[in-house]
Image (cartoon, rainbow, N blue to C red):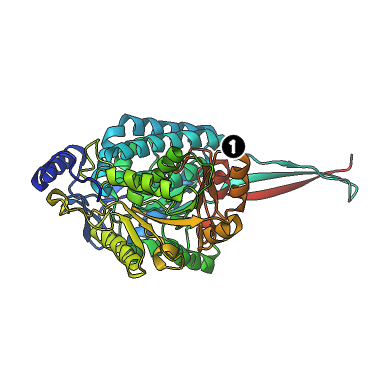
Amino acid sequence: MGATDNSSTTVDEIKQRHESTASDVLTEDTYGHYIGGEWVDADNGETFSTVDPTTGSELAQAQAGTAADIDRAVAAAREAFEREFADTHPDERQRLLTDIAEIVEENHQRLATIEVLDNGKPIEEAMGDIALVADFFRYFAGAARTATGEQVPTGDLFDRDKHISTLHEPYGVVGQITPWNFPLLMATWKLAPALAAGNCTVLKPSEETPLSVLEFCKLADSTVPDGVINVVTGYGEEAGEPLTTHDDVDKLAFTGSTAVGKDIAHNAADSVTPTTLELGGKSPVIIHEDADLEQAVETCMMAIFFNTGECCAAGSRIFVHENIKDDFLEAFAGAAETLQMGDPLLEETDLGPKVSQEQAERTMEYIQLARDDDADVVVGGDTPDDDALAEGAFVEPTVIDNIDHDNDAVQEEIFGPVEEIFTWSEYDEMIEQANDVDYGLASGVITSNINKAYDTAEDLEAGVVWVNHYNDVSPGMPFGGYKQSGNGRENAMETIREYTQTKSISVNLGPR
């Protein structure tokens, strides 16, 4: 049972704190779509509620977008691209992204607080997320000048001189769909490289957490040319699918579940629209016998309990060598029990609620699957026994041992604070099992031997391998998955290439 009472507060005190904070940081009761630099209502006039997962109370209303709203947004993006943005010089785009970074930094605390209210993540984690938002905009401001072509050496095969060069040109209009776990950061991972490359965008944020993106647009409105960034809120079927099937969208980028990613890939295939997909994960963390115990515990805590486990890269399967398994499990379980669940607006809170009651129930269903398989729930496995948290979507930090690796709770992404422990002695058998999932987004290795670290990293089928740390995604480090964890890479120089298409120009210079 994890600690849950972080200030002896009552449910009414938490509600009052959240209501007061929301009135301070939110500027609207009902938010519009952001299309062509204007705030507009949905074509059908319908809205939906966005809910504070800590209290269950409504925060605001957002527009319930449909295909008609997507049409308006795509048209606005196309007009902006053809009017001016296609011809912007890289240094202009660099200044634009730098200005956006400064706006984010000036509003750091407010944007972080909005994410706490809308998502439920602890304030300290939200502050870190928003710092990264500014950092990624600054990174891609610099990268805006890297979309340069190449000169291709040629021979005299046809007895003539030739000059072959390449250009990297923006696609035009990019459709982007982002998840609820890192609302503004995931939007930044899409917006910053797309703009750096010279594209205009139509972004659909998750219906669970649209508020920080909408407030970001309000802040950046005077800086970003009209139509360059457009945001349509709504549900996946009504707003997301029309974006992925729109015949005037030139490129698609999505972060979310593998199931939805497959649907988007199918939609894109009909029009041969290029896609970048960052999908689910069920990542292993390999602990070697020579690992430092304290470092192993610290790394694994970050791997699974950061952001309440709502992390596509979460290290949710630990493979620990049998010679240190007992000591590790005792220390890790003890650390998990000290985590403090509570009001995410308070700095002492380690774990906030999950994003919704639906997601909390889904996590509990997976824990029950483990129990049905006679697995040992070493820590947690329930909702907190604390009246102050009764109306929030809380799930205890959970550690499970002795579970069959074929169990659905192991093979499928739980997306919650649930860690599963496996013991190994034979390296090859362990690696085979570690890779025995459909996913390949991330992984971790904990060892004091650098040769073991590199050997294990090469053996893991994953797009990212962290050694002796976890969940550190820095600007410039390519991020993306193997297998059903997606295609393409984000956050790095090569991401600019994901948002451009290559044109070859071959010139016959004639006889000398």
Indicate whether 222 appears above or below 496.
above
**Residue 217 x, y percent position in the rendering:** 33, 42
Residue closest to the eye, 345 or 508:
345
Q: Which residue is mark 1?
A: 146
Mark 1, other Cα within 10 Å: few <14 / some 14–19 / many ≥20? some
Residue closest to the eye, 186 or 34:
186
**In this picture, residue 329 sits left or right of residue 199:** left
Q: Does the rendering let one see residue 200?
A: yes
The C terminus is located in which quarter?
A: top right
Mark 1: which amino acid? Thr
**In this picture, residue 18 sits left or right of residue 372:** left
**Residue 46 x, y percent position in the rendering:** 22, 61
In which image quadrant can residue 149 be found?
Answer: top right
**Residue 45 x, y percent position in the rendering:** 22, 60
Residue closest to the eye, 295 or 466:
295
Q: Does the rendering let one see residue 275?
A: no
Residue closest to the eye, 96 or 327:
327
At a point 34% along the width and 61% down the height, the residue shown is 376
**In this picture, residue 346 sits left or right of residue 171:** left
Instruction: Say how many tags the image has.
Output: 1
Indicate whether 27 appears above or below 310.
above
**Residue 156 x, y percent position in the rendering:** 89, 46
At a point 41% along the width and 37% down the height, the residue shown is 132
Q: Secondary structure at mark 1?
A: helix
**In this picture, residue 78 sits left or right of residue 212:** right
